[in-house]
Amino acid sequence: MSAIKEPSFRESVDLMFNRAVALMDLPPGLEEKIRVCNATYTVRFGVRLRGEIKTFTGYRSVHSEHMEPVKGGIRFATSVNQDEVEALAALMTYKCALVEAPFGGSKGGLCIDPREYDEHELERVTRRFAYELAKRDLIHPSQNVPAPDMGTGEREMAWIADQYARMNTTDINARACVTGKPLNAGGISGRVEATGRGVQYALREFFRDPRDSEKAGLSGGLDGKRVIVQGLGNVGYHAAKFLSDEDGAIIVGIIERDGALVNPSGLDVDAVQQWLAKHGGIADYPDATHHAEGGAILEEECDILIPAALEGVINISNAARVKAPLIIEAANGPVTAGADEILRKKGTVIIPDMYANAGGVTVSYFEWVKNLSHIRFGRMQRRQEEARHQLVVDELEKISEAMGPQYSLTDRFKQKYLRGADELELVRSGLDDTMRIAYQSMRDVWHDRADVEDLRTAAYLVSIDKVAASYRAKGL
Ligand code: GLU
């Protein structure tokens, strides 16, 4: 361990924020107003479990209400604390601004190890936590809309939605009180894969401009790029799967709780994930070399490093040894402010968390809109679109018949062209568009401003500018 003290997660976010605002011309006081967390609520409640009363501590922090509702996940982990939820809430503000999701930033957490409880117990704890938050309007369709985060998923969101609906029996928009719900409880297609999908779209956009990949000393596209992923949870799994299945990237390393798997010719992401689900670890997975000291693999040779687990995993004690020329922060805060400085000096390109993992909240936004409009995306136009395409195909077929058999339309073309978009396709298209536009806004700042060295500062500049504009418009 280095002798220099690492700042806390929230201090790290503040330091990065400060670096960016130093390059801006904000009116006095507004900078401070944007930086600070507006409120953090701590709730302590008892639940009778296994014959005794257990007291749990939870938080919901609201960073900025320049737009409402405020948005951000709820995390279940023993490490949850006020500093962490405040840092994560601040990141949500910047993330939503950057991808133009019309929300302020919030985050919640419950100190609990979900693996210690059975499903029934977890349901009681989650419902009680939701009750405590909802009765204070910290869960509310127009004020505060949680979503999944580490340790939570569709199941917990369904319990929260149901708890809110029980407490607000006449609220026609009750389902919009939380996102990340299962499809049958008001969810949207593509939300589970969304954050990993967003990481894929982010990387595709990065490699679209050779000036960007050159900055990382890379060339070409994603095909054949060697990738190391840390954390095979929802985000890491989907990112790794899509990159290898659809873009030809080679997953050479996967780091998990019980060590890392390495295979230079590529790991089968689905096989590793199935092994992990079945055995609770990756240690004995057959088609790779297992390293008990998983963290060391963060320092291995590769083209792209994807930290997709906890915050602070790349810090001042290991940053200098990280060899990847490109890091994409699929997790929130995986690179500390100290490590960021070391890596920046080395020329490592970092695609920052507030952009890289924004796919989750982007599709949450679509889900919230779907809940408020009470209709599935594509329901009105899909068949009409198909009918109009059929007209075009019929006309083309008439012409091609007259021109001869070599001009006939291929079945593949007809199949692809005739099919109207369903909800999943529309969600992916909206997500792709969002990730491209947000990246382009960072890219412009990165390339055009001589005083902006890195994508993180560019991301902060774009998002703080938007938050500041909202405050100004409100007359603050
Ligand atoms: N927890 C996710 C995040 O950190 C998703 C938040 C949301 O969908 O509101 O971005």
Image (spheres, rainbow, N blue to C red):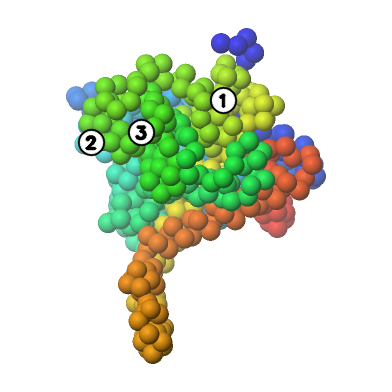
293 versus 212 height, above or below: above
Q: Is residue 297 above or below residue 37?
A: above
**Secondary structure found at label 3:** loop
Could you classify mark 1 by the number of other residues whose Cα lies within 10 Å: few (under 14), some (14-19), or many (20 or more)?
Answer: some
Q: Nearer the viewer, mark 3 or mark 2?
A: 3
Seen in the image, is 113 located left or right of residue 227?
left
How far is the residue under mark 3 from the one under mark 2?
32 Å
Residue 379: x and y in percent read: 35, 71
Disc 2 residue type?
Answer: Glu
**Residue carrying label 3:** 267
**Residue type, mark 3 in image:** Leu
Of the pair 331 and 38, the residue shown nearer to us: 331
Give the secondary structure at mark 1.
loop
- Disc nearer the start of the sequence (3/2): 2
Which residue corresponds to mark 2? Answer: 119
The numbered mark, 1 or 2, whose residue comes first in the sequence reads: 2
Q: What residue lies at 34% left-to-right and 42% top-to-bottom?
A: 153
Residues 86 and 348: in front is: 348
Q: Is residue 32 visible?
A: no
